[in-house]
Image (cartoon, rainbow, N blue to C red):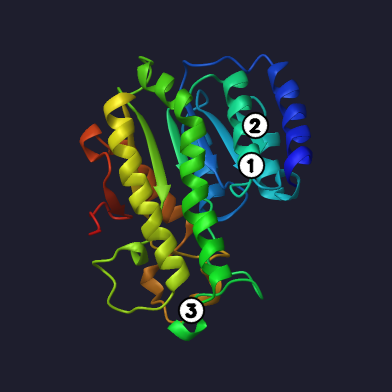
Amino acid sequence: MRGSTLRAAMSTVVRAFSSSPAAPGGGGGGVSMVQGASRGIGLEFVRQLLRRSDQVRVVATCRAPDSAAELQELRREHARRLTVLPLDVTDESTIEAAAAAVGETHGSLDLLINAAGILSIPNVIQPETSLSKVRKSSLLLAYEVNAVGPILVIKHMRPFLKIGASLETGKGFSLVANMSARVGSVGDNALGGWHSYRASKTALNQLTKTASVELGKKDNIACILLHPGTVDTDLSRPFQRNVAKDKLFTREFSVQKLLSIIDNAKKTDNGKFFAWDGQEIPW
C-alpha cells in the first residue's frame, strides 16, 4: 500500500482505536513504537514488549499490516494494548500519517525501535561479492530503506518522544534504538564486500550519531545503535551457510539481549553503538 491507500487505512485505524476505552495517552507502563514489525526481529520486539506488563502499550508499524498474519494475531490477542499502523519508510507521507495517529491515540512515546531493513530481494538487490557487481540502483535502495527511512521516522516521532521524556513514569529520558549491523563499522571492516548494505548501515550510524547530539541537548532523547548478531530470520537465511551454529541466534535470544541493553541504557550512552552482548562497536 502507498499514498492515499495507506492514509485511508490509517484513518480507519485511528477511528477504531480512538473509540476504544484503552486509548488514553501517557501513564501506565509507557508507550513503545516498533517500526518494521511485520516479521523477524521487529515482530519479536513487539511480542516480548507486550509480555512484560499488562500496562505496556505498543505501536507496531509495517508497510502492509493486512498481510502481516502474525502481527494481526498479536493484535487480536492484545487488542487493548497493541495498535497496528501502516508505515512505508520509502514514503514520507505515510510516516507523517503514522505520527498523526500516534499523537491522536497515545500522545507520547517512551521508546522508538527502528527495525526495518533490506539486504536482498531476488532480481532487485543482492549483497555484492566484488566491486564489479555494484549497481547504482542497489546502493540507492539500500540507502533509502536502511538509512533514510529510520531518520525520517525519528524526525516525525520526535515531538512524542520529547513528551515521553518529560513524563514521571519513565526513567528521565526517551530512547531511540536503531537496528544497525557490525558490517556498518568502518574500523571493523576487514573482509570487504556487501558494498550497498555496509554503506547504508554506515550512513545510518552517522545519521543517528548526528541526531543524538541535537536530541540529547534539546529534548532529553537518547539515541543508540544496536547490532543484533546474525539472527535466523528471512533477511539472513540466504547467507547462513557459513555461520557457525553457536553464532546463529534465534529471534527470541537476540531480542532478549537487545532489550536488556535498552533497559539498562543511560543518558550517557547517547550516540553509542552496541553489539548484542553489550560491547561497544568501533565506528
* Image x and y of residue 275, in percent: 30, 56
Residue 141, numbered label:
none
- Pointer 3: what residue? 128
Indicate the quadrant where residue 281 lies: bottom left
Instruction: Work out whether residue 131 or residue 274 is closer to the camera in this orientation and state it.
Output: 131
The quarter of the picture where the C terminus appears is bottom left
- Secondary structure at numbered mark 3: loop
* Image x and y of residue 23, in percent: 62, 18
- Pointer 2: what residue? 97
| Amino acid, disc 2 | Ala
Q: Residue at x 58, y 29 (%)?
A: 99
Residue 87, numbered label:
1
* Image x and y of residue 172, in percent: 30, 22
Going by the image, does 157 lie left or right of 12? left
Answer yes or no: do the residues labelled 2 and 3 have beta carbons within 8 Å? Answer: no
Answer yes or no: do the residues labelled 2 and 1 have beta carbons within 8 Å? Answer: yes
